[in-house]
Structures are given as structure tokens and as C-alpha cells.
């Protein structure tokens, strides 16, 4: 009954009010004070593979795929697509460099949220594929329920790269949730894709990667998991070994991040000639 009421509310409330409700959900996200190690944080939370997360994400994504909803992010449905225009610009840049060919490796891409966000602009390219690398249970669900002629799912970076040669890599809201983000960055930069796009990544202006526990409100799904606030200088130096930053941009607004002197940012990197 509660879920039915939420659905009805979204149908009859003015869009501006619906957006305000969803904005308040983001304001309910909070970050528990700093932990010394990733292991310490892990021992005090449920983790990203908590039961119920996949179920909610799959339910929302299927509504988008089937045309029952417009846009999904983190299992929350929206009445309009909130584009990340810099990300789309970077994707089009990669396609332009390769005669309209765009092969995306979307690391940690859930069930294809960014694909569904951008497919209107990308499906008309002469050679296009979107390839998500995710946790095993997400991959199984994606292959069974979501995959189509453009969108596919892989369990490892190696499996994806062996099947395609990506010319664009997307890391959207994922680096801060990895135990060792530096290792993943090094692995992905070695692929040699033309463009690396980072979006919705938590950064700070210090020289240290700080560790917190992020608490997600039950209005989204009940979970808490370890989370970095990455040193922006560390991140730029790590990728800057082989890539040049073409642009940076402010991403989502999250009031809770101001309390830990951090913010969501994004970046466009182009492979150094």
C-alpha cells in the first residue's frame, strides 16, 4: 500500500513538488565520521551488496526500459532525465574521433542507468555499444532482464576488453565506493581508451583520501557502506600520468558533503598524444 501511494503521488503531484521531494531525499543522506581504515568502516556497515538493493534497482530500471518511467538513478525514478551534459560531450568526442564508433566501458554502471540516460543521443551512431562491468549478481540480473542489442554486462574488466576495445571509459559514482580506487584507475588507464569520463565523484581539497560510512535513507533503500572522499589532487595526478584533463565540472548537489568539506565533481580526460 505504501509503495502504491508513492506511485500515485508521483502521478498527481506537480513535477516541481516531486523534484523537491526527491531533492530532500538526497538531503537525508549522511556521512558518519572519519574511519582510520577501509576495513574499520566495512566492519561497521552492511555494504553495497546488502539484500534488497538489487531488487529495487531492477524494479526501477525495468520501468525505464519498458517506457513506464523516464529516468532512474540509484533506484529512484524521475519525471525527467537529469542529463550530465559534460559526460555526453565526452562520449560524443570519443565517437567523433573514431568516425562515429563509440564503445563504452561503464565500470560500476549498475543496470545501465547512464546508458538509458543517454541512449536517445547515442543509438543513432553507426557503431555503438554500451558495456557495463559490475558485481556478479548485477550482471546476472542485467543479462536476464535488461540487456539489449546495445547494452551488455560483464563481470570483469578483462572480459569486457577482450570482447570489445573501448574508446570511452565511464566512472560515474563508483570510485568512492571501491576499496582500492587507485588500482582500478591504473587498470583502466592502461587500456588506452581515447576518453575517460568521471562523474558524481566525491572529492576534497586536501591531500588525503578520507574514509566515511555513507548512510542511505530508507526512502531510497536501507543501506550503509564505506565511502571515500578522494583527494582531488591525488585523483588528478593518478590519471594525469597518461591523460590530460580537458575539463572539470561540478556534479550533484549534496548538502551532507559540505559537512565533510567535500563535493561531487566530474572530469573529462583525453589520452595524451
Image (cartoon, grey):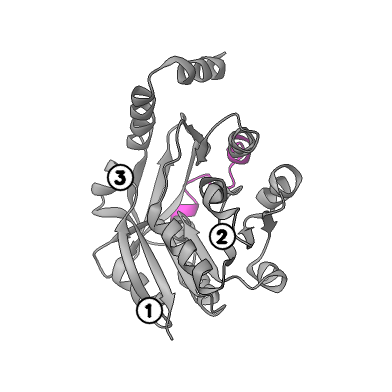
Where disc 2 sits, the SS reads strand
Q: Is residue 97 left or right of residue 82?
A: right
C-alpha distance separating marks 2 and 3:
23 Å
> Which range is magenta?
41-56
Mark 1 sits on what residue? 240
Where disc 3 sits, the SS reads loop
C-alpha distance separating marks 1 and 2:
20 Å
* Residue ID at (69%, 49%): 137
User: Dot 1: within a 10 Å radius of its alpha carbon, few (fewer than 14), some, or many (20 or more) residues?
Assistant: some
Where disc 1 sits, the SS reads loop
Could one spot residue 178 in this view of the protein? no
The quadrant of the picture occupied by the C terminus is bottom left
* Residue ID at (59%, 47%): 49
In the rendering, which numbered label is found on residue 253?
3
In the rendering, which numbered label is found on residue 106?
2
- Across and down, in percent, residue 6 comes to 49, 19
The front one of 29 and 196 is 196
Whether residue 239 is situated above or below residue 10 in the rendered picture: below
Contact (Cβ within 8 Å) of mark 1 with mark 3:
no
* Residue ID at (52%, 20%): 7
The front one of 141 and 250 is 250
Magenta-drawn stretch contains 49:
yes
Amino acid at each position: 500500500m505504501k509503495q502504491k501511494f508513492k506511485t500515485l503521488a508521483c502521478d498527481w503531484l506537480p513535477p516541481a513538488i516531486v523534484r523537491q521531494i526527491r531533492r530532500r531525499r538526497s538531503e537525508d543522506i549522511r556521512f558518519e565520521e572519519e574511519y582510520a581504515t577501509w576495513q574499520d568502516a566495512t566492519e561497521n556497515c552492511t555494504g553495497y551488496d546488502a539484500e534488497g538493493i538489487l531488487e529495487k534497482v531492477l524494479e526501477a530500471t525495468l520501468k525505464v526500459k519498458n517506457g513506464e518511467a523516464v529516468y532512474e538513478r540509484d533506484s529512484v525514478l524521475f519525471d525527467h532525465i537529469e542529463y550530465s551534459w559534460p559526460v555526453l560531450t565526452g562520449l560524443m568526442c570519443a565517437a567523433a574521433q573514431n568516425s562515429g564508433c563509440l564503445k563504452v566501458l561503464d565500470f560500476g554502471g549498475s543496470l545501465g542507468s547512464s546508458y538509458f540516460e543517454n541512449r536517445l543521443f547515442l543509438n543513432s551512431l553507426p557503431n555503438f555499444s554500451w558495456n557495463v562491468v559490475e558485481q556478479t549478481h548485477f550482471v546476472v540480473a542485467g543479462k536476464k532482464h535488461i540487456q539489449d542489442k546495445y547494452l551488455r554486462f560483464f563481470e570483469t574488466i578483462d572480459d569486457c576488453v577482450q570482447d570489445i576495445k573501448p574508446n570511452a571509459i565511464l566512472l560515474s559514482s563508483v570510485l568512492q565506493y571501491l576499496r582500492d580506487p587507485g588500482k582500478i584507475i591504473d587498470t583502466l588507464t592502461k587500456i588506452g581508451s581515447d576518453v575517460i569520463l568521471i562523474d558524481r565523484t566525491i572529492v576534497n581539497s586536501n591531500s588525503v583520501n578520507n574514509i566515511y560510512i555513507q548512510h542511505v535513507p530508507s526512502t531510497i533503500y536501507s543501506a550503509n557502506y564505506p565511502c571515500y572522499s578522494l583527494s582531488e589532487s591525488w585523483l588528478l595526478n593518478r590519471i594525469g600520468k597518461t591523460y590530460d584533463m580537458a575539463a572539470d565540472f561540478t556534479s550533484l548537489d549534496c548538502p551532507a558533503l559540505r559537512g565533510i568539506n567535500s563535493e561531487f565533481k566530474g572530469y573529462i580526460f583525453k589520452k595524451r598524444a
